Amino acid sequence: MKLVFSIQEFNDEVQRAVYGAIYSIVGETGLRSLHNHLKAYYGITPDEIPYRLESLFDSLDHTLGLREARRLGMEIARRVYYRYSIDFRPIEGYALKDYLEEAKRVLSHLKEPVSVLEA
């Protein structure tokens, strides 16, 4: 089956959602601090975030606490789902990675190319 959405575009949307959600909570200074922390302790550069979500959330769990990290994960998922016009519904026990895998599954079954909504 040929994908009608780009994995790279999807990962770019995840990265934008991560930045947007974190920025809305901690602002520019907090976002820069997070980048520094991720680089120093996890070796993650900003462009690697979509591929290293578990490390990102380990970091957020340690800095914000598990409850806030989960809330942030749901906000990131909501933002990605919105951009692709997918209905978002919280699912008990789902983490961000689960929501993103579900979004990829939904998108992979589409017959027409995906257009991404403007933020």
Image (spheres, helix red, strand yellow):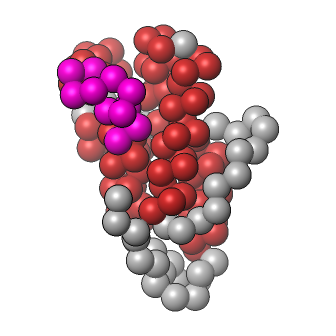
x and y percent of residue 70 in the render? Answer: 59, 28
Whether residue 39 is visible here, answered yes or no, is no
x and y percent of residue 17 in the render? Answer: 40, 47
Quadrant in which the N terminus appears: bottom right
Q: Is residue 91 above or below residue 65?
A: below
Residue bounds of the magenta highlight: 20-30
x and y percent of residue 23 in the render? Answer: 32, 33
Quadrant in which the C terminus appears: bottom left
Q: Quadrant of residue 50?
A: top left
x and y percent of residue 115 in the render? Answer: 41, 77
Q: Is residue 45 left or right of residue 53?
A: left
Which residue lies at the image location 40% right of the left edge and 69% below the top edge?
Answer: 117
Q: Is residue 99 left or right of residue 115?
A: right
Q: Is residue 2 above or below residue 36?
A: below
Q: Is residue 71 above or below residue 85?
A: above
Q: Is residue 90 magenta?
A: no
Q: Is residue 18 above or below residue 14?
A: above
